[in-house]
Image: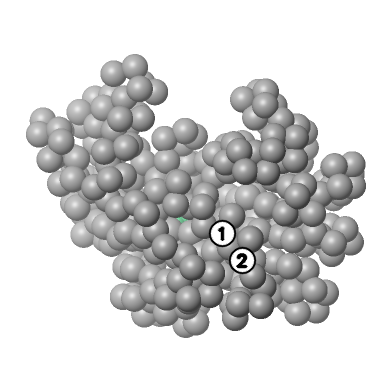
Amino acid sequence: MKHILIVGAGGQIGSELTVYLRSIYGNNNVVATDMRDCPALAADGPFEQLDALNTEAVASVVKRYKIDAIFNLVALLSATGEKNPQLAWKINIGALMNALEIARENNCAVFTPSSIGAFGPTTPKDMTPQDTIMQPTTMYGVCKVTGEMLGNYYYQRFGVDARSVRFPGIISNVTLPGGGTTDYAVEIYYEAIKTGKFVCPVPSDVYMDMIYMPDALRACVELMEADPAKLVHRNSFNIASMSFTPEIIYAELKKRMPEFTMTYDVDPVKKAIAESWPNKLDDSCARAEWGWKPEWDLSSMTDDMLEKVRIKLGK
Ligand code: AKB
């Protein structure tokens, strides 16, 4: 990768991936784009405000900056997707199809995230294998499975170097996620510091895979830089780091903040989604094919999140 385009750079992943990629590949070689203006991203490198569904606009940026790798991060997440499934399909698949077609015409590689949301209630829940039953019951999941198949199709049919990981819920302290089922695991840190209380929207005993942002960013680069000859899979790799329930993350926070309290007001949509997803993925193919290895666990992440969020909130 020499000249990189990030589509959807203003979101939770993009706002940090842009900075991370610029630190590796050089500020001027990473072009950030988003629907909204993003002054922070425009301050230290090229930024273009554009609609990811506008094929001409995206293609023109690809040509102008001689892009050779596209990171398509545009997505409506799982809970929002259930409020407007038609819009979720239009945006999630529309942006991906644009990225793949433009990549085909301009000889670019493509990274697009899949998710634990690509799995459903018929998938084996524990140590979910790389290749297994994928029958999601959300529109977000339907888009993710479709996206994985499109990535493989474009690789096999047109030679587009499309690669992807199935992200767990991503925990971060720069840009808040929005509309996801795993968002609670970010919000809990902010509320613990702001108010000392948190009302959890998912059931106390539901396990979901989670990952800390620094590991998620590293996974994107390591997969895209991996030797293609070693890749048996492409779209999309299970990656795992930690898996916990709301009670487990609550206990981790209580160790450091004994006064902190958590109660539940379970959202039925998030409950159904969370219960349909795996408890823990088996990431042995990612480890074997491109050397994936997480560096953060719940304890080290909690120390870091509390420190960073306290600084951010001035507390
Ligand atoms: C969501 O909760 O929708 C996302 C995801 C796990 O893909 N964070």
Which residue in the protein does label 1 denote? 222
Task: From this view, report whether residue 105 is shown above or below residue 67.
Answer: below
Q: Is residue 35 visible?
A: no
Applied colour scheme: one colour
Q: On screen, 181 above or below 161? A: above
Assign a secondary structure to mark 1: helix
Q: Which residue is depicted at the point 31% across and 75% down? A: 126
Find the residue positioned furthest to the top.
314
Residue at x-position 21% and y-position 59%: 205
- Which label belongs to residue 226? 2
Element at label 2: loop
Q: Image check: 138 left or right of 57?
A: left
Give the image location of residue 310, x and y in percent. 31, 25
Look at label 2 and name its amino acid.
Ala
Residue drawn 52% across the image and 57% down it: 219
Compared with 39, 122 (above or below) is below
**Quarter of the rendering containing residue 268:** bottom left
Q: Nearer the viewer, residue 282 or 219?
A: 219
Q: Which mark is residue 251?
A: none
Q: Outermost residue, left direction?
A: 258
Q: Amino acid at mark 1?
A: Glu
Q: Are marks 1 and 2 in contact (CB under 8 Å)?
A: yes
Quadrant containing the N terminus is bottom right
